[in-house]
Amino acid sequence: MRTIGVVTSGGDAPGMNAAIRAVTRLACYHGLIVLGFERGWEGLIKNNFRRLDSRSVGGIIQLGGTILRTSRCPEFRTREGIKRAAENLTSNGVDGLVVIGGEGSFRGALELSRETDTLIAGVPATIDNDVYGTDETIGFDTAVNTAVAEIDKIRDTAFSHERIFIVEVMGRKRGFLALTVGLTVGAEVILVPEVPIKLDEIFEIVKENTAKGKRSGIIVAAEGIGDTRMLAEEIERNTGAEVRLSIVGYAQRGGSPTARSRLLACLFAEEAVRLLLDEAGNRVVGLQNGAITSMDLETACGNIKPLNIELLKLARVLST
Ligand code: F6P
């Protein structure tokens, strides 16, 4: 192992910069050359990279986004695109590649691993927290805290105006973000794609709460459940409550990473570089029951991370 590449791919997540910094400094410490590929997979296809060293990653641990930039790259879904990326890795003598990204990025990495001898180490970074094989991804904690801070403010208006607020959070097709946010803001209802709830059930909870004297409430909805605007209208029509919708949106993707997101970035980077130094590639690092671990890329891509449904029940009891 003489040269490694590092790339951030897919949606940006707070803590990606902390991961780039840690990978680069650890690799330099071990005498490796580090190439940072720009704009995700696009950089590998177009052969756009810059040499990184310990100094070029200074002052970024606290920054959101990614200094290498990122993109959604449709060309990488084609065989031709993957082949070109593989050729560029070979022509630049890249022995190992650290891929910092989410589920989609690892699926791309798996395809790439079939076309190249370059060893790949995946570092899970996505606000969605939907990567199999890790209890938590870089950026998730930051996104949770961003949404929680927003909802705490919304509660003031909900209370003052005696309204129900539906707050939509991100998460793509999964409910990890909504579940943790919902539990930690004390939401009366949490809606996730994994556990569809009938509209009547939601109306019932709202009516019950009103009868109990609760005159305001928060419903946290994952974006993956569908049309939240229509849901707000339906609840208003069927319960008589005044309902507003607030979408947290891309603010969840940005901002300075929390200490927790930075810590995961440091620990995941250490494991990724160690794997490559040991010539043990095509693996994704992760956190399992408090320990830093790794699993092969194929297993990580071939499985769906389960959502802890018990937490939904807990949230329900705690909001009564
Ligand atoms: O994967 C992160 C994420 O923010 C999802 O929560 C969201 O569904 C998606 O990316 C949005 O993608 P884009 O940045 O392409 O609009």
Image: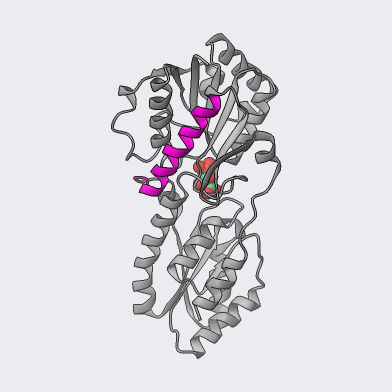
Judge from the rendering whether residue 184 lies leftward or rightward of residue 289; answer left or right.
left
Q: Position of residue 162 (x, y in %)?
A: 40, 80
Magenta stretch containing residue 265, yes or no? yes
Residue drawn at (49%, 67%) of the image = 183
Residue drawn at (59%, 72%) of the image = 313
Judge from the rendering whether residue 127 lies leftward or rightward of residue 260; answer left or right.
right
Given residues 246 and 65, the one toward you in this image is: 65
Residue drawn at (71%, 41%) of the image = 302
Q: Is residue 55 above or below residue 319?
A: above
User: Which SS does the magenta portion mostly show?
Assistant: helix
Q: Is residue 100 above or below residue 173?
A: above
Q: Position of residue 286 (x, y in %)?
A: 55, 42
Which residue in the rendered view is the most extreme toward the top? 91
Q: Position of residue 159 (x, y in %)?
A: 37, 78
Residue drawn at (63%, 28%) of the image = 282
Q: Position of residue 5 (x, y in %)?
A: 49, 21
For residue 105, say whether it is visible: no
What range of the chain is rendered magenta? Answer: 256-276
